[in-house]
Image (cartoon, rainbow, N blue to C red):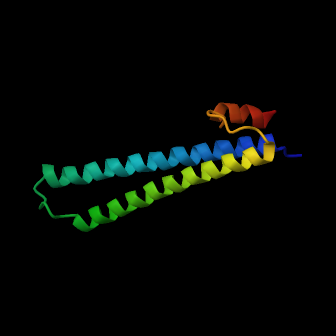
Amino acid sequence: MLTVEIAGARVARDLEEAERMTNESLRALARLNVSMMNVRLDTDVPQYQGQTALIRLQEAQRHMVDAMSNLTRVHKSLRDDFTKITALPDTPGRCPATEVAKVAESA
């Protein structure tokens, strides 16, 4: 039978991965932005070239920042739910790191 602790460890692991991947995506978009600007500044391409693509990239970055904000809300909501279910206090550092979550899940 699946226990709350094991289920919580799985959720914590998956949430941590989602947060990490969102940050990785933001970093990749930032690198793309720099690459696109380098083309404008370091080549003979006209300074206005790629403006539509740049606007769309900025929009994608905004959506990723919004996604990260929503993941933060998910994280907070899950912490609140876990506190209600387990009657444990909400203490800093309570969310398990990935390795701790793996150990709890395999137990």
Image point (57%, 53%), residue name? 73
Q: Is residue 23 left or right of residue 96?
A: left
28 or 69: nearer the eye? 69
Image point (14%, 51%), residue name? 41
Query: x%, y% of residue 31?
Result: 33, 47
Quarter location, residue 59:
bottom left
43 or 68: nearer the eye? 68
Query: x%, y% of residue 15?
Result: 62, 47
Label count reads 0
Q: Quadrant of the C terminus?
A: top right
Q: Is residue 96 left or right of residue 1?
A: left
- From this viewpoint, which residue is outermost toward the bottom? 52
Image point (59%, 43%), residue name? 16
Q: Is residue 10 left or right of residue 46?
A: right
Query: x%, y% of residue 8?
Result: 74, 44
Considering only vertical position in the picture, is 2 above or below 53? above
Considering only vertical position in the picture, is 39 above or below 100? below
Query: x%, y% of residue 30?
Result: 34, 49
Quarter location, residue 45:
bottom left
Image point (44%, 54%), residue name? 65
Considering only vertical position in the picture, is 7 above or below 51? above
